[in-house]
Image: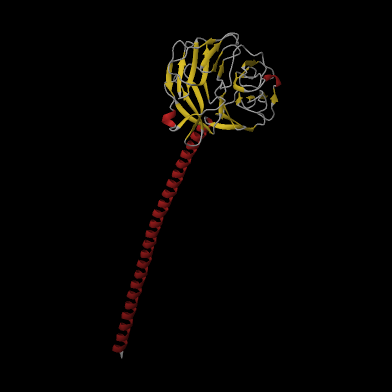
Amino acid sequence: MKYLRAKVITIAVLCIVVIGVLIGILVRLNKDGKEKEVLIEDAKNTDDLTEVSKDIDDIDDSEESEDIASVDDSDAQDISEAENKEAWNVTLELNVKQPVRMAAFLNESFGITGGFSGAGKTCYTTNGGESWTINEGSGGCIFGVEIVDSNIVWICGKMTGMSFRTPGGLRMSTDGGKTLGDTLDFKTGPSTCPLSFLDDMRGWVSQDGVISETRDGGLNFNEIKLPEGLGKIAGIGVYEAGDDFFGSVLSGDGILYITKDHGESWTDSALPIKEGYDGYKIGKFEGASTAIRFFDKDNALAVMSLTGKEEPLIIGFRTSDGGMTWSDEIIGKGQGSVYLSPDGCYVTGYYNKNVTVYRYGMKDHDE
Protein backbone atom coordinates (compact mmCIF):
# COMPACT_ATOMS: atom_id res chain seq x y z
CA MET A 1 0.00 0.00 0.00
CA LYS A 2 2.79 2.34 0.87
CA TYR A 3 4.51 1.35 -2.38
CA LEU A 4 1.40 2.20 -4.41
CA ARG A 5 1.07 5.60 -2.71
CA ALA A 6 4.69 6.40 -3.47
CA LYS A 7 4.20 5.43 -7.11
CA VAL A 8 1.13 7.64 -7.40
CA ILE A 9 3.02 10.53 -5.86
CA THR A 10 5.91 9.96 -8.28
CA ILE A 11 3.55 9.91 -11.28
CA ALA A 12 1.84 13.07 -10.00
CA VAL A 13 5.18 14.82 -9.64
CA LEU A 14 6.19 13.73 -13.13
CA CYS A 15 2.88 15.03 -14.47
CA ILE A 16 3.44 18.31 -12.70
CA VAL A 17 6.95 18.49 -14.17
CA VAL A 18 5.66 17.62 -17.64
CA ILE A 19 2.90 20.17 -17.31
CA GLY A 20 5.46 22.73 -16.16
CA VAL A 21 7.69 21.93 -19.11
CA LEU A 22 4.75 22.15 -21.48
CA ILE A 23 3.69 25.43 -19.94
CA GLY A 24 7.25 26.71 -20.32
CA ILE A 25 7.34 25.61 -23.93
CA LEU A 26 3.98 27.26 -24.59
CA VAL A 27 5.13 30.45 -22.89
CA ARG A 28 8.31 30.48 -24.94
CA LEU A 29 6.42 29.77 -28.13
CA ASN A 30 4.01 32.56 -27.30
CA LYS A 31 6.91 34.88 -26.55
CA ASP A 32 8.67 33.90 -29.76
CA GLY A 33 5.44 34.48 -31.65
CA LYS A 34 5.07 37.90 -30.14
CA GLU A 35 8.68 38.67 -30.87
CA LYS A 36 8.11 37.49 -34.40
CA GLU A 37 5.03 39.68 -34.61
CA VAL A 38 7.07 42.52 -33.23
CA LEU A 39 9.79 41.81 -35.75
CA ILE A 40 7.23 41.56 -38.52
CA GLU A 41 5.57 44.74 -37.30
CA ASP A 42 8.97 46.38 -37.08
CA ALA A 43 9.67 45.24 -40.61
CA LYS A 44 6.35 46.63 -41.69
CA ASN A 45 7.10 49.84 -39.89
CA THR A 46 10.47 49.94 -41.61
CA ASP A 47 8.76 49.42 -44.96
CA ASP A 48 6.22 52.04 -44.02
CA LEU A 49 9.01 54.41 -43.10
CA THR A 50 10.70 53.61 -46.38
CA GLU A 51 7.45 54.24 -48.20
CA VAL A 52 6.83 57.36 -46.16
CA SER A 53 10.38 58.43 -46.92
CA LYS A 54 9.72 57.73 -50.56
CA ASP A 55 6.45 59.63 -50.33
CA ILE A 56 8.22 62.53 -48.65
CA ASP A 57 10.93 62.43 -51.28
CA ASP A 58 8.26 62.27 -53.95
CA ILE A 59 6.39 65.14 -52.36
CA ASP A 60 9.57 67.16 -51.94
CA ASP A 61 10.65 66.37 -55.49
CA SER A 62 7.18 67.05 -56.80
CA GLU A 63 6.86 70.29 -54.87
CA GLU A 64 10.37 71.29 -55.80
CA SER A 65 9.68 70.36 -59.39
CA GLU A 66 6.44 72.31 -59.29
CA ASP A 67 8.24 75.22 -57.65
CA ILE A 68 10.92 75.12 -60.33
CA ALA A 69 8.27 74.80 -63.02
CA SER A 70 6.40 77.66 -61.38
CA VAL A 71 9.55 79.78 -61.37
CA ASP A 72 10.26 78.81 -64.96
CA ASP A 73 6.67 79.61 -65.94
CA SER A 74 6.91 82.89 -64.04
CA ASP A 75 10.16 83.75 -65.77
CA ALA A 76 8.69 82.76 -69.12
CA GLN A 77 5.64 84.87 -68.38
CA ASP A 78 7.84 87.80 -67.40
CA ILE A 79 9.81 87.38 -70.62
CA SER A 80 6.59 87.07 -72.59
CA GLU A 81 5.19 90.18 -70.93
CA ALA A 82 8.46 92.00 -71.56
CA GLU A 83 8.26 90.99 -75.21
CA ASN A 84 4.62 92.06 -75.39
CA LYS A 85 5.60 95.46 -74.03
CA GLU A 86 7.79 95.85 -77.09
CA ALA A 87 5.16 94.55 -79.51
CA TRP A 88 2.74 96.43 -81.73
CA ASN A 89 -0.81 96.53 -80.40
CA VAL A 90 -3.98 98.02 -81.84
CA THR A 91 -4.86 101.15 -79.89
CA LEU A 92 -7.56 102.64 -82.18
CA GLU A 93 -9.99 101.11 -84.66
CA LEU A 94 -12.15 103.66 -86.45
CA ASN A 95 -14.75 103.55 -89.17
CA VAL A 96 -14.69 107.00 -90.75
CA LYS A 97 -17.46 108.64 -92.76
CA GLN A 98 -15.42 111.31 -94.55
CA PRO A 99 -13.62 110.47 -97.83
CA VAL A 100 -10.10 109.31 -96.96
CA ARG A 101 -7.02 108.54 -99.01
CA MET A 102 -4.41 109.17 -96.31
CA ALA A 103 -4.78 108.96 -92.54
CA ALA A 104 -2.11 109.93 -90.02
CA PHE A 105 -2.07 109.88 -86.22
CA LEU A 106 0.60 111.56 -84.12
CA ASN A 107 -0.56 109.72 -81.01
CA GLU A 108 -3.77 108.26 -79.61
CA SER A 109 -5.50 111.65 -79.66
CA PHE A 110 -4.40 113.79 -82.59
CA GLY A 111 -4.96 112.67 -86.17
CA ILE A 112 -5.44 114.03 -89.70
CA THR A 113 -7.19 112.63 -92.77
CA GLY A 114 -7.19 113.78 -96.37
CA GLY A 115 -9.44 112.30 -99.02
CA PHE A 116 -10.20 111.85 -102.68
CA SER A 117 -12.20 114.20 -104.93
CA GLY A 118 -13.34 117.67 -104.00
CA ALA A 119 -15.16 116.24 -100.97
CA GLY A 120 -11.95 114.84 -99.53
CA LYS A 121 -11.06 117.89 -97.51
CA THR A 122 -8.67 117.76 -94.58
CA CYS A 123 -10.24 116.65 -91.30
CA TYR A 124 -8.63 116.61 -87.88
CA THR A 125 -9.40 115.04 -84.52
CA THR A 126 -8.08 115.75 -81.05
CA ASN A 127 -10.00 112.99 -79.24
CA GLY A 128 -8.87 109.83 -80.95
CA GLY A 129 -11.45 109.93 -83.73
CA GLU A 130 -14.54 110.26 -81.56
CA SER A 131 -15.28 113.40 -83.58
CA TRP A 132 -13.75 115.04 -86.65
CA THR A 133 -13.63 118.69 -87.72
CA ILE A 134 -13.56 119.53 -91.43
CA ASN A 135 -11.22 122.23 -92.69
CA GLU A 136 -13.42 123.72 -95.39
CA GLY A 137 -10.57 125.81 -96.75
CA SER A 138 -8.29 122.88 -97.46
CA GLY A 139 -9.69 121.95 -100.85
CA GLY A 140 -9.73 118.25 -101.66
CA CYS A 141 -7.97 115.36 -103.32
CA ILE A 142 -5.20 114.96 -100.74
CA PHE A 143 -2.37 112.54 -101.55
CA GLY A 144 0.10 113.12 -98.73
CA VAL A 145 0.09 114.10 -95.04
CA GLU A 146 2.99 114.77 -92.68
CA ILE A 147 2.54 115.61 -88.99
CA VAL A 148 5.57 117.22 -87.35
CA ASP A 149 3.83 117.82 -84.02
CA SER A 150 0.37 118.71 -82.74
CA ASN A 151 0.65 122.13 -84.43
CA ILE A 152 2.69 121.76 -87.61
CA VAL A 153 1.05 119.72 -90.36
CA TRP A 154 2.00 119.52 -94.04
CA ILE A 155 -0.41 118.30 -96.72
CA CYS A 156 0.13 117.59 -100.39
CA GLY A 157 -2.54 117.31 -103.09
CA LYS A 158 -4.56 119.11 -105.72
CA MET A 159 -6.56 121.17 -103.24
CA THR A 160 -7.91 123.36 -106.06
CA GLY A 161 -10.41 122.58 -108.79
CA MET A 162 -12.03 119.26 -109.56
CA SER A 163 -10.05 118.08 -112.57
CA PHE A 164 -6.95 115.91 -112.33
CA ARG A 165 -5.45 118.32 -114.85
CA THR A 166 -5.62 121.10 -112.31
CA PRO A 167 -2.27 121.26 -110.50
CA GLY A 168 -2.27 120.96 -106.76
CA GLY A 169 0.29 122.10 -104.27
CA LEU A 170 1.86 121.96 -100.86
CA ARG A 171 0.37 123.69 -97.82
CA MET A 172 1.24 123.92 -94.14
CA SER A 173 -0.81 124.36 -90.98
CA THR A 174 0.64 125.79 -87.80
CA ASP A 175 -2.45 125.22 -85.65
CA GLY A 176 -3.04 121.49 -85.94
CA GLY A 177 -5.03 121.58 -89.17
CA LYS A 178 -7.56 124.23 -88.19
CA THR A 179 -6.25 126.56 -90.88
CA LEU A 180 -3.81 126.20 -93.78
CA GLY A 181 -1.33 128.65 -95.22
CA ASP A 182 -1.19 129.66 -98.85
CA THR A 183 -0.42 127.07 -101.49
CA LEU A 184 3.33 127.08 -102.02
CA ASP A 185 4.93 127.41 -105.41
CA PHE A 186 5.36 123.68 -105.78
CA LYS A 187 3.13 121.89 -108.25
CA THR A 188 1.79 118.47 -107.43
CA GLY A 189 -0.09 116.02 -109.60
CA PRO A 190 -2.72 113.37 -108.92
CA SER A 191 -0.33 110.76 -107.59
CA THR A 192 1.28 109.54 -104.38
CA CYS A 193 3.07 112.38 -102.63
CA PRO A 194 5.61 111.16 -100.04
CA LEU A 195 6.50 113.85 -97.49
CA SER A 196 9.08 114.09 -94.73
CA PHE A 197 9.54 117.30 -92.74
CA LEU A 198 11.66 118.10 -89.70
CA ASP A 199 9.80 121.28 -88.75
CA ASP A 200 8.05 124.22 -90.39
CA MET A 201 11.11 125.01 -92.51
CA ARG A 202 13.03 121.91 -93.59
CA GLY A 203 11.85 118.87 -95.47
CA TRP A 204 11.62 116.73 -98.60
CA VAL A 205 8.73 116.25 -101.03
CA SER A 206 8.56 113.67 -103.80
CA GLN A 207 6.54 114.00 -106.99
CA ASP A 208 6.82 112.22 -110.35
CA GLY A 209 10.16 110.56 -109.56
CA VAL A 210 11.76 113.77 -108.30
CA ILE A 211 12.71 114.70 -104.73
CA SER A 212 12.77 118.37 -103.82
CA GLU A 213 14.22 119.87 -100.65
CA THR A 214 13.25 123.08 -98.91
CA ARG A 215 15.09 124.74 -96.03
CA ASP A 216 13.00 127.90 -95.84
CA GLY A 217 9.45 126.70 -95.35
CA GLY A 218 8.74 126.13 -99.02
CA LEU A 219 9.80 129.50 -100.39
CA ASN A 220 12.48 127.75 -102.40
CA PHE A 221 13.06 124.15 -103.48
CA ASN A 222 16.20 122.41 -104.65
CA GLU A 223 16.13 119.15 -106.56
CA ILE A 224 18.02 116.30 -104.89
CA LYS A 225 20.37 114.31 -107.09
CA LEU A 226 19.14 110.72 -106.88
CA PRO A 227 21.21 107.53 -106.93
CA GLU A 228 21.52 105.60 -110.17
CA GLY A 229 19.19 102.67 -110.61
CA LEU A 230 16.74 103.93 -108.00
CA GLY A 231 13.60 103.15 -109.96
CA LYS A 232 10.19 104.03 -108.51
CA ILE A 233 10.24 106.05 -105.29
CA ALA A 234 8.10 104.33 -102.66
CA GLY A 235 8.99 106.47 -99.64
CA ILE A 236 11.31 109.12 -98.24
CA GLY A 237 12.58 110.15 -94.81
CA VAL A 238 14.87 112.85 -93.41
CA TYR A 239 16.61 113.29 -90.07
CA GLU A 240 18.82 116.14 -88.88
CA ALA A 241 20.34 116.93 -85.49
CA GLY A 242 23.39 119.12 -85.13
CA ASP A 243 25.91 118.05 -87.73
CA ASP A 244 24.11 114.78 -88.43
CA PHE A 245 21.90 114.66 -91.52
CA PHE A 246 20.29 111.57 -92.99
CA GLY A 247 18.12 111.55 -96.07
CA SER A 248 16.66 108.26 -97.24
CA VAL A 249 14.77 107.01 -100.26
CA LEU A 250 13.07 103.63 -100.47
CA SER A 251 12.70 102.11 -103.92
CA GLY A 252 9.71 100.08 -105.03
CA ASP A 253 11.76 96.89 -104.86
CA GLY A 254 12.82 97.39 -101.23
CA ILE A 255 16.25 99.02 -101.52
CA LEU A 256 16.87 101.83 -99.04
CA TYR A 257 19.28 104.52 -100.25
CA ILE A 258 20.85 106.81 -97.64
CA THR A 259 22.62 110.12 -98.08
CA LYS A 260 24.49 112.14 -95.46
CA ASP A 261 25.26 115.10 -97.72
CA HIS A 262 21.91 116.08 -99.25
CA GLY A 263 22.24 113.78 -102.24
CA GLU A 264 25.88 114.28 -103.21
CA SER A 265 26.62 110.62 -102.41
CA TRP A 266 24.54 107.57 -101.52
CA THR A 267 24.86 104.18 -99.88
CA ASP A 268 22.28 101.44 -100.29
CA SER A 269 20.87 98.75 -98.05
CA ALA A 270 18.46 96.00 -99.10
CA LEU A 271 15.59 95.39 -96.72
CA PRO A 272 15.09 91.64 -96.13
CA ILE A 273 11.68 91.45 -97.79
CA LYS A 274 12.47 88.46 -100.01
CA GLU A 275 14.28 86.61 -97.21
CA GLY A 276 11.49 86.96 -94.68
CA TYR A 277 8.42 87.42 -96.85
CA ASP A 278 8.91 85.49 -100.04
CA GLY A 279 6.12 86.13 -102.51
CA TYR A 280 5.34 89.56 -101.06
CA LYS A 281 6.04 93.01 -102.46
CA ILE A 282 5.37 96.61 -101.48
CA GLY A 283 1.71 97.35 -102.19
CA LYS A 284 0.49 100.01 -104.59
CA PHE A 285 -2.10 102.43 -103.26
CA GLU A 286 -3.07 106.04 -103.96
CA GLY A 287 -1.79 106.93 -100.51
CA ALA A 288 1.71 106.19 -99.21
CA SER A 289 2.43 102.47 -98.85
CA THR A 290 5.69 103.03 -96.93
CA ALA A 291 7.07 105.30 -94.22
CA ILE A 292 10.65 105.84 -93.01
CA ARG A 293 11.97 107.46 -89.83
CA PHE A 294 15.52 107.94 -88.61
CA PHE A 295 15.74 108.64 -84.87
CA ASP A 296 19.49 109.21 -84.76
CA LYS A 297 22.45 108.29 -86.96
CA ASP A 298 22.12 104.58 -86.13
CA ASN A 299 18.47 103.84 -85.40
CA ALA A 300 15.73 103.85 -88.00
CA LEU A 301 12.42 102.16 -88.78
CA ALA A 302 10.89 101.50 -92.19
CA VAL A 303 7.21 100.53 -92.29
CA MET A 304 5.40 99.19 -95.33
CA SER A 305 2.24 97.55 -96.53
CA LEU A 306 3.09 94.23 -98.20
CA THR A 307 0.79 92.32 -100.52
CA GLY A 308 1.38 88.89 -101.99
CA LYS A 309 0.32 85.28 -102.24
CA GLU A 310 -1.04 85.19 -98.68
CA GLU A 311 -2.78 87.59 -96.31
CA PRO A 312 -1.51 91.19 -96.68
CA LEU A 313 0.68 92.46 -93.86
CA ILE A 314 1.99 95.71 -92.41
CA ILE A 315 5.64 95.08 -91.61
CA GLY A 316 8.35 97.08 -89.89
CA PHE A 317 12.08 96.76 -90.59
CA ARG A 318 14.34 98.13 -87.86
CA THR A 319 18.05 98.92 -87.83
CA SER A 320 20.34 99.93 -84.98
CA ASP A 321 23.53 100.25 -87.03
CA GLY A 322 22.66 102.81 -89.66
CA GLY A 323 21.18 100.32 -92.12
CA MET A 324 23.93 97.71 -92.17
CA THR A 325 21.58 95.06 -90.73
CA TRP A 326 17.82 94.86 -90.28
CA SER A 327 15.34 92.97 -88.11
CA ASP A 328 11.68 92.62 -89.00
CA GLU A 329 8.50 92.82 -86.95
CA ILE A 330 4.86 92.24 -87.86
CA ILE A 331 2.83 95.33 -87.02
CA GLY A 332 -0.54 94.04 -88.15
CA LYS A 333 -2.53 92.20 -90.77
CA GLY A 334 -4.18 94.10 -93.58
CA GLN A 335 -3.33 96.44 -96.42
CA GLY A 336 -3.65 100.06 -97.43
CA SER A 337 -1.82 103.32 -96.93
CA VAL A 338 0.48 103.65 -93.92
CA TYR A 339 1.87 106.48 -91.82
CA LEU A 340 4.56 106.37 -89.11
CA SER A 341 4.64 109.01 -86.37
CA PRO A 342 7.90 110.98 -85.95
CA ASP A 343 8.74 109.21 -82.68
CA GLY A 344 8.26 105.80 -84.32
CA CYS A 345 5.64 104.71 -81.79
CA TYR A 346 2.44 104.90 -83.82
CA VAL A 347 1.60 103.39 -87.20
CA THR A 348 -1.62 104.41 -88.92
CA GLY A 349 -3.14 102.14 -91.54
CA TYR A 350 -6.08 103.03 -93.76
CA TYR A 351 -8.14 100.81 -96.05
CA ASN A 352 -11.75 100.93 -97.19
CA LYS A 353 -13.07 103.48 -94.64
CA ASN A 354 -11.27 101.80 -91.75
CA VAL A 355 -8.48 103.53 -89.83
CA THR A 356 -6.34 101.39 -87.54
CA VAL A 357 -3.70 102.84 -85.24
CA TYR A 358 -1.00 100.56 -83.84
CA ARG A 359 1.09 101.48 -80.82
CA TYR A 360 4.60 100.21 -80.08
CA GLY A 361 5.31 99.18 -76.49
CA MET A 362 3.83 100.60 -73.30
CA LYS A 363 5.79 103.83 -73.02
CA ASP A 364 3.82 107.04 -72.68
CA HIS A 365 4.61 109.75 -75.18
CA ASP A 366 3.87 113.42 -75.13
CA GLU A 367 2.17 115.12 -77.99
Q: Which residue is located at x 56 percent, y 18 percent?
A: 195
Judge from the rendering whether residue 160 lies leftward or rightward of residue 254; answer left or right: right
Q: Is residue 293 visible?
A: no
Q: Quadrant of the N terminus?
A: bottom left
Q: Residue furthest bottom?
A: 1
Asked if residue 286 is positioned above or below residue 206 in the image, the reply reads below
Q: Which residue is located at x 50 percent, y 9 percent?
A: 243
Percent of width and height locating residue 250: 48, 21
Q: Which of the pair 367/143 is nearer the observer?
A: 143
Please tell me how many numbered marks the rendered image carries.
0
What color scheme is it? secondary structure
Percent of width and height locating residue 110: 64, 24
Judge from the rendering whether residue 108 lies leftward or rightward of residue 277; answer left or right: right
Judge from the rendering whether residue 119 lies leftward or rightward of residue 288; answer left or right: right
Asked if residue 276 is positioned above or below residue 263 in the image, the reply reads below
Asked if residue 68 is positioned above or below residue 43 in the image, the reply reads above
